[in-house]
């Protein structure tokens, strides 16, 4: 999430952390996205909040910013820095995530040292201007079966209502913007998504 995704992005982030999100990706994009010092200051505020809650802070696209800020990791797409360069640059003890859409991209990400891959858009989304066509959950299942040790994070149009299907397809986690950032109650939205994650791990009866 970034400053373009909500009117009060820091308060949304704090609510999301209270609701139990387990990872945050700083994704400052869009026509009016912050740049330079303002971007850095906003990123630092997000990182500070994440640290208070003991939640990893990952920078999207920008390996140098991740390094400068001693972020917990970096996430790169197919059009960003190559995953193996990101891994080389950021070091072995940081998180590297890679967006993939095909089996080949997933295989390469794994060889290049990705800790997880992001796959989507699973459902329709308006949060990404250059989003690929909706992929559904099929490719998650295919990649999950081929590479059972590679954690897959589903992304794109995911809500508490459709989250179970993404886990059932084989995802280990979910990544969302709108489901939390545009919710009337972001904390509750985060809590509902967390429950879906817990249900996928412990079964329906364990989490009410
Ligand atoms: N990549 C595919 S969809 C997307 C990204 C970064 C944005 C997801 O946003 P939302 O609002 O959860 O649909
Ligand atoms: Mg990118």
Image: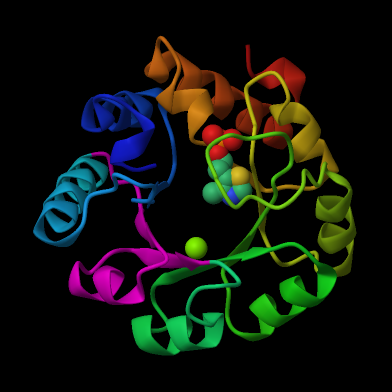
Q: Nearer the viewer, residue 130 or 101?
A: 130
Q: Is residue 125 left or right of residue 104?
A: left
* Residue at 24 percent of width and 25 percent of height: 8
From the top left corner, tell me how far across and down residue 205 is, in percent: 73, 16
Residue closest to the far front: 31
Image height of 104 relative to 48, above or below: below
Highlighted range, magenta: 53-76
Quarter occupied by the C terminus: top right
Image height of 144 relative to 62, above or below: above
Q: Quadrant of residue 116?
A: bottom right
Q: Is residue 173 left or right of residue 146?
A: left
From the top left corner, tell me how far across and down residue 21 is, in percent: 43, 35
From the top left corner, tell me how far across and down residue 129 is, in percent: 55, 46
Residue 65 shown in magenta: yes
* Residue at 83 percent of width and 62 percent of height: 143
Image height of 100 relative to 184, above or below: below
Q: Nearer the viewer, residue 6 or 15?
A: 6
Quarter occupied by the N terminus: top left
Q: Quadrant of residue 123?
A: top right
* Residue at 48 percent of width and 35 percent of height: 177
Image height of 146 relative to 168, above or below: below
Q: Quadrant of residue 66?
A: bottom left
């Amino acid at each position: 999430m970034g400053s373009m995704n909500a009117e009060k992005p820091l308060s949304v982030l704090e609510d999301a952390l209270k609701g139990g999100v387990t990872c945050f990706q700083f994704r400052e994009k869009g026509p009016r996205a912050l740049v330079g010092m303002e971007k850095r200051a906003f990123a630092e505020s997000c990182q500070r909040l994440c640290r208070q809650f003991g939640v990893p802070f990952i920078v999207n696209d920008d390996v140098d910013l991740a390094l400068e800020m001693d972020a917990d990791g970096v996430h790169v797409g197919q059009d960003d820095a190559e995953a193996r360069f990101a891994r080389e640059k950021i070091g072995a003890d940081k998180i590297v995530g890679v967006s993939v859409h095909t089996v080949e991209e997933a295989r390469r990400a794994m060889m290049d040292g990705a800790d997880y891959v992001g796959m989507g858009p699973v459902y329709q989304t308006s949060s990404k201007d250059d989003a690929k066509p909706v992929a559904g959950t099929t490719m998650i299942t295919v990649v999950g079966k081929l590479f059972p040790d590679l954690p897959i994070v589903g992304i794109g149009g995911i809500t508490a209502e459709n989250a179970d299907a993404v886990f059932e397809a084989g995802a280990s986690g979910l990544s969302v913007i709108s489901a939390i950032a545009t919710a009337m109650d972001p904390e509750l939205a985060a809590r509902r998504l967390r429950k879906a994650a817990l249900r996928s791990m412990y079964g329906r009866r364990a989490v009410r």
